[in-house]
Amino acid sequence: MRSVGAILLGLCAAFACASVPLPNDALEAQRVRQVVETMQSAIDRQDPGAYMAMIDPSDPVLITEHRAWFADLDVSPVDDLRVELDAQAQVVLDDDGSVIAPLVFSWQVPSEEKPRRYEMPARFAPIGSTKGQWHFTGRAWEIALLDTPGVRIYCDEVHHDIAQLAMERVPAIRDAIAQDMGIDPNGGDLHEVVVKIYPKMRELQASIYPSYTAGISGWNEPGESIKILGRDE
């Protein structure tokens, strides 16, 4: 991934650089398939515990987002929801030991004639040994701006300028709000601010809930990231 200052590129647009293609029978590839299959099985069985067990436990923002995402399947059901790896696409091992694989979501909104579908580069990582438990750690963003404590901003290369602007403004806004609430911004009591800049509206909508169909340019709920639409193609 890429941060301000020390730029760490974890994902190139073409999965190049330090990433290594994995054969289908590689242990890492098998573990990733198991995670995705468990996620799909949990969706089919309406089992939130099994689904959430596959989400990265070290990221409270991601956990909150996926807990809300799964809960909406009961509130506003969609039909034929499938979460699958693209069998024709390359799965790669990144230099940090994580795996990047194209994840395909497809579903039918009852009020629409055509099914919805989108594909995103997804990241999976183990806890400890490669032979141990693997988790879905979220979208594999091309850029991560992580230099400011308590602030994380994610985007793809095309939206780097927007991310830089957000990084310049978000900490000051966060600190000003904290001061208005009587909180010392340097006291360590501030919640982490996470910003995710999505390249397409369809992906932004689906990251909220599969049932979400209204036009939208941004989204935020308590405990979740600030989601922004960078460009809709």
Image: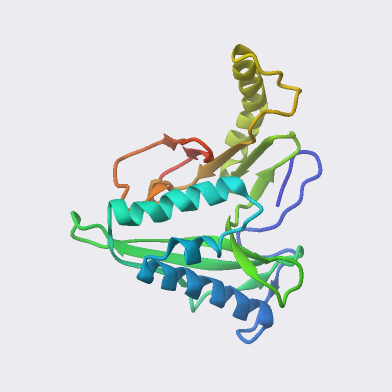
Return the x and y of residue 141 as percentages of the image width and height. Answer: 60, 52
Quadrant of the rendered structure where residue 101 is?
bottom right
Residue sitting at the far bottom: 25
| Residue found farthest to the right | 6
On screen, residue 233 versus residue 188, left or right, reads left
Classify 224 as above or below 47. above
Residue 90 shows up from this direction: no
Looking at the image, residue 62 sits to the left or right of residue 79; the answer is right
Front residue of this view, candidates 70 and 106: 70
**Residue 82 sits in quarter:** bottom left
Locate residue 64 relative to residue 96 in the image: left or right.
left
Tell me what residue is drawn at x 43 percent, y 69 percent.
42
Q: Position of residue 208 (x, y in %)?
A: 41, 47
Q: Tell me if I can see residue 10 in this picture.
A: yes
The part of the image, by quadrant, that contains residue 182 is: top right
Of 104 and 50, the residue lying toward us: 50
Residue 19, horizontal then vertical, whole percent = 71, 67
Q: Residue, x 71% and y 18% (percent of image)?
A: 184
Badge count: 0
User: What residue is at 49 percent from the left and 67 percent from the top?
Assistant: 50
How was this image coloured? Answer: rainbow
Instruction: Identify the residue shown where x is 52% and y is 47%.
Output: 64
Taking 19 as reference, is 205 above or below it? above
Residue 233, position as x, y percentages in the image: 40, 48
Task: Looking at the picture, tell me which residue is in the foreground, 96 or 176.
Answer: 176
